[in-house]
Image: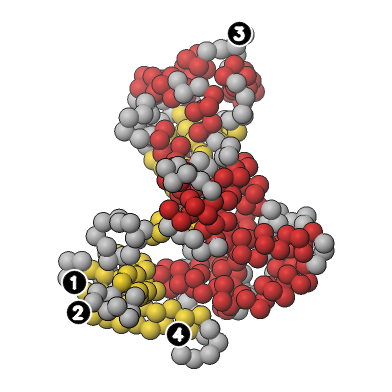
Amino acid sequence: MLYIIVYTIIVVTIKFEFINRERELQYLEEEHEKGDFRFISVIGRRRLGKTRLIREFLEDKSDFCYLLIPELNDEEVRLEIAANFHEKFGLSFLGTPSWDELFEKLFRLSEQKRIILVFDEFQRFFDINKSIFSYLQKQIDRYAGSSKLFFIVSGSSIGMMHRIFDHAAPLYGRRTGQLIFEPFRFYSLKEWFPNYSPVEKVHIYAIYGGTPKYLEEVEHKNLAESLKKILNRTSLLYSEPETLLKTEVQDSNTYFNILKVIAAGTTTPSDIATASGIKPTSIDYFLTVLRNDLDLVRRETPVCEKKPTKKSIYLIKDNFFKFWFRFIYPNYSELEMDNSDLVLSKIEAELDRFTGPAFEEITRQFLISLNHQGKLPFTFGKIGKQWGKFRGEPGKNTYEIDLAALNESTKEILFCECKWQKQPV
């Protein structure tokens, strides 16, 4: 069967149940109440609220130690942890303790009472001393049956955090649970901005995406004031992409150039390599880091393709990064000369056109919700964009479908065209 849906929406009124971070907080509370050994990882890129969630969880707790793993050498980190264990748990050490001594004393204490330990930016141990994971595994295997330790490890380098727990790693199978942090979906904005109209909420999502830290920068007066705030050189978001890359990766200029090229519309690996001046043999590595470690780009393949092929393209995943590379970075000279009003006029003139791809994503989320509720003619297992070439049609080179949802078993497919415009189609 073939289903075709054409979406022409002038004002969007989509009602969803609001989902904030209450579910994640409830999960931590329920795990904590169990009383036995728990080892939970919290994984997600920066600015998504991982640390805020943990601090909220710790707010009414006693006997806890929260430690942001410092970027120091092995001995300095051991001394830092020992000092925190002494201050928070009353544990004493002579000189510089070994990793075995640190973890063994911690686990022995946890046999007597419920204690909470949080290691934030846990992946930094890769650079400090990779053997730490083996030391930790040894003590977990020894004490997990008798320990009351509630152990949370959090990290913003997604790929590295997953590698810590993969099948070949010492800590494989030692976790008791995990939380994966994703940006908020569009429907979450209803609770964030109750005074904004549906159209304004779509614009906010197109500009800021679903990153909580970015959404906190939205002015509640009106959208124009929010845009002015971004354009202010003192604002958090004015140079956010540059700041984040410098924090996360060593060769930040290379990653910056790749994102700039993708934002300009270059999407295939070979073209990205050429446009950014990177060797074709190296581009896959950088794209993998941007995709798997930083979660800033996504690879998209025509949804009807059964296997990833050379048709795959790379797109910027974060809406604010798209906005920044489209409107902020190209206008740096104007903004540095305090001509923000001119840049604001450019943004306002092009905002609806810029919003189109974000509206496609909102529609995708909407269809997924309807699918879960069983409100579509059939249940689909895949959804995404479809494109390709017409066979035997020399005069018609390519086609593109905004969204296609399909059930491969029943051979049913739904086509959706998404239009964000004021004029009716």
Nearest to N terminus: mark 2 or mark 1:
2
Report the amino acid beneath label 4: Thr
Give the Cα separation between the discs numbered 3 and 1.
69 Å
- Sequence-first disc among 2 and 3: 2
| Residue 173 shows in this picture | no
Dot 4 crowding, Cα within 10 Å, few <14, some 14–19, many 20+: some
Q: Position of residue 273 (x, y in %)?
A: 48, 50
Asked if the residue at tag 1 contacts the one at tag 4, i.e. Cβ–Cβ closer than 8 Å, the answer is no
> Residue 219 got which mark?
none
Find the distance from the CA under tag 2 to the CA under tag 3.
74 Å
Q: Is residue 156 left or right of residue 224?
A: left
| Residue 411 seen by the camera | yes
- Which residue lies at the image location 69% right of the left edge and 74% below the top edge? 346
- Position of 291 relative to 366 (above/below): above
Q: Residue furthest bottom?
A: 424
Label 1 environment density (alpha carbons within 10 Å; few <14, some 14–19, many ≥20): few
Relative height, residue 362 to residue 160 (above, below): below
Quadrant of the image occupied by residue 94: top right
Seen at 82% across and 63% down, the residue is 338
User: Relative to residue 178, is residue 234 drawn left or right?
Assistant: right
Question: Label 4 belongs to which residue?
Answer: 8
Distance CA(mark 2)–CA(mark 1): 7 Å
Find residue 230 and report its horizontal and vertical position in percent.
71, 62
Q: How many residues crowd mark 3 within 10 Å: few (<14), some (14–19), many (20+)? A: few
Determine the CA span between mark 4 and mark 2.
23 Å
Helix, strand or loop status at disc 3: loop
Mark 3 sits on what residue?
94
